[in-house]
Image (cartoon, rainbow, N blue to C red):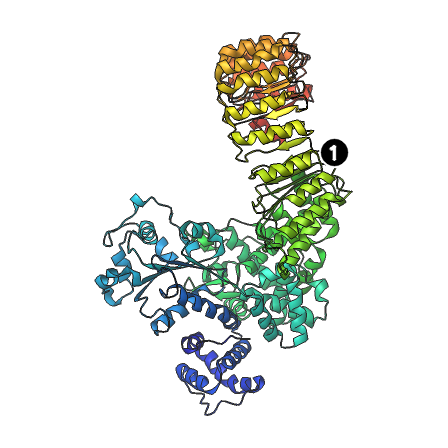
Amino acid sequence: MAESGSLDFDLLWYLEKLNKREFQSLKNHLGQACVEIGLPPIPRLDLRKTRPDLVDLLTVSYEVQHIWNIMYSIFHKINRDNLCEKINARGMIIEILNQLDVAYNPTTTVSPKDLNVFLVGEKAAGKTMAIEMAVSEWADGKIWKDVISYVIYLTSQEINQMANSSLVDLISKGWPKGQAPIADILSDPQKVLFILEDLDNIEVNLNMNESALCGDSRQQVPGWELLASLLMRKMAPGCSFLISSRPDCEAAVRALMKTTDKFMTLQFSNEMRQKYFTFFFKDSHRATTAFKLVQENEMFMDLCQVPILCWVTCVALNWQMDMEDDLQHFCQTLTDIYAHFLAHTLTFEAGVPANQYPLVLLERLCSLALEGLSHDTLHFSEKDLRCVGLTRADVSTLQTLKILLPSSNHKDHYTFIHLKIQEFCAAIAYMMVLTKCPIPSASKRYKERRERYNDFSPITTSIFGLLNEKRRNILETSFGCHLLTGELRQYFLQKMKCFGNNSKAMEHHTPLFHCLFENQEEEFVKQVMDSFSEASVYIQNNRDLMASSYCLKCCHFLQKLRLSIQCIFENKKPNVMLTSGKMKSLVYWRDICNLLHTRENLQELEICNSELDDTSERVLCKALRHPSCQLRTLKLTYLSVGTTFEDVFKAIVYNQNLTFLSLNCMPISLKMFSLLHEVLESSMCSIQHLSLMKCDLETHACKEIASLLISSKLKKLTLSKNPLKNNGVKILCDALLHPDCGLESLVLLFCCLTKNCCSSLGRALMFSKTLKHLDLSANYLQNHEVLVLTLPLLFPTCQLQELELSGCFFTNDVCQHIASAMINNPNFRSLELGSNNIGDSGMEVLCNALKHPSCKLENIGLEECMLTSACCASLTSVLKSSKTLKKLNLLGNKLGDEGIVKLLEGLGHPDCILQTVGLQINDMDVETMKLLLTVKKKNTKLVFISQSWAKKEGREVSKKV
């Protein structure tokens, strides 16, 4: 199992981790262990030998590989499995040592100056061990010879608790009596290596302006400033850093990392996992069966990247094999692994009769886990253990079982073998009736950053897993306990219905999908998924794909699906043999794509922020071309620029249900325009709405766009957030007047337009036979240009029905012209004027128009228009008299309590036909609340959009009604 490598420091380091009793036990087992492995006995073995003597004896007697196999076997026998896990990690660490040696060697790198090497791995992955081994190898002159002269150790705890200090103080702390050769060290910083452990636990803000950094090595500054000054090389310029971190500190790593820096990951490779399984199970058939199960399950594969969790997995699978159970049936989820692990260790390995003691031990352990995570505590004092009822004997048993271990960071403290085990125990605690047992550490004022626990999703996922009767029975049968499920099940179902009714309530559904995948109770999963008509899925790895594929297949009423796929399809080159990981990705991806032709309700698909390769693209295209695909909307947003889309466009042609194509936030090249022409001009194509929002389209692109308008059947075109400018829009306006252009809606929001384009737009409005909707919001048009735009609406040739001018920088001076258009144009139905300085005087003019019998307006948007209570009487009159107005948005105006009351009276009038109103109602008194409820009761069709009402009604607050 073990890897070959240097032994000098390694083996002695392991032996020094044993107490006297354990070391003596190791020597007693040594002879038999050699025989079991098939080696000759050690000559002249003296059981009184010291640790260094034994290292010397073993080194001259056997090959390195055999010595590690012997040690692994004995450590397992004397219940030091934590040392077995460190041996498992050795192969990985030896490779890391080789990489570290090369990284700081100026003969093998371009420039070691200012080098940062980031060593990233999960908890218990071996980061500290790798660093200690590297320092030892350096001290023995085996690496970094003549490259590194001084190594200075920094830890996150030290930095976080550091008061004002200087670089000189920092260097001197590790020297006898603080007598460090400062002048020699700082004379050549390029030969100084700073080791910073646990970047993810650093409290300080490292994003500082250079002017705030300190360059004086003797100046006393706060710890955060000192560290930032070192990392930015304001101090000790040219020095190197070796920085360890957990993966959840990715943002800080990216902020610090330069292109010349090195990034190394510590994780259990597939080869190492296979060797570990072979050694753990001894029996080759068992090892192969277990390893195959892990390989086929993404959740298990991810779990087994960490050596200690690989051991947990093997313990659980081995027990299932002992029970002669079918692994494929009984071990499908992480809940199975954790439940089998706890059941086996606490009921069988504990060496106690099958009475109430295992249950008592479980309850105390789960109380500790939940109290800890509820109060940001991962390291427990002896007082904490006593508070939840754990005796010294209990703690000793839990240590023997490798569930609790002495903390390596806090003296006289204990911690769970891994956070995932603590999270699972906390989930069990939620489902048991346990007495609350506050622990002293909960009130500790200072908490390390990595102890702050604010993501309870793993606990929720485990709770969903334990709602499954089969998985729950593992614990209930083993411990004789009862887990509460009925109430939780109903609670989750009700909660999911609320989320399903509010599409904005859940940002993305991936965490829920992991919960449901963990549950795998078909009827329950179906009940939950049937609550959703929309799903937004953020996929970062195969685990997310696996869970999403499983859940989406159970969602029978899905109408809209939004997918964001990150770095899953890693092979970009065609005709390259697929890796097993990519094969799995494609299987899950195929399952998701199959929804396009197996779900008749699914009408909208958005793929955003994604990287698809040729193979995954072909899977998507096949689904789009399927005759049963009912998709009406396809949105491709922020996709990788390397994708050609040729196959996608061909699929679009054959899908005659597809009416809306969005290519937002995509680089639209000439080749892309050529493909668009080919698609949109096809007689088979049904696309009517094309969106090219935020595609960096400039004036020169408008010729291509104009050509599309003339040659296609497009009814709506969205070009928002492109710097088209005035000349570009003039080209589009010419196309609008072409007899073959049938465009009905044009959206030009925030397209860098000014007054110079308005005459062209006005001409298009006057003479276009098809244009019914125009959006010019967020363009600098001002008063005169708005006048130019509204003038054509007075003529009978104008077909416009909807005009949006929000945020166009005009004032009440043009309200009379707008009012004339409202009265004289019988086609006019909707007007958006928000975020303009209309004021009360302008509103009076608009109200007179709204009350005119010739005004047919159904919607008017007046959010943030500088309105006050002074205009509310006129607005109330409109509400009572208008026979057409159904939507009114007044959000963002300071109407005051008096104005609100007037409006509510108008809304309650029997002649009011308004259906939707946007009102900012804050801090209502009792009378206003009564009036609001009366209005709501009288007009059951009326929908209020306001912060206070939305909170009560569970509706979304929206600026735009």
Which image quarter: residue 53?
A: bottom left
Q: Quadrant of the C terminus?
A: top right
| Farthest-out residue, right | 627
Q: Nearer the viewer, residue 448 or 86?
A: 86
In percent of width and height, residue 836 lies at: 50, 19
In percent of width and height, residue 62 lies at: 49, 85
Q: Do we see residue 35 in this rendering?
A: yes
**Count of labels shown?**
1
Residue plotted at (72% across, 68% down): 325
Q: Secondary structure at mark 1?
A: loop
Check the image and report above or below for 138 versus 387. Answer: below
Residue plotted at (71% across, 36% down): 658
Residue 297 falls left or right of residue 81: right
Q: Do we see residue 431 in this rendering?
A: no
Check the image and report above or below for 758 versus 489. Answer: above
Check the image and report above or below for 404 versus 462. Answer: below
Dot 1 crowding, Cα within 10 Å, few <14, some 14–19, many 20+ = few
Give, as a three-letter code, the residue at label 1: Ser
* Residue at the disc numbered 1: 683
Residue 661 falls left or right of residue 184: right
Q: Quadrant of the N terminus?
A: bottom right
Which image quarter: residue 187?
A: bottom left
Which image quarter: residue 559?
A: top right
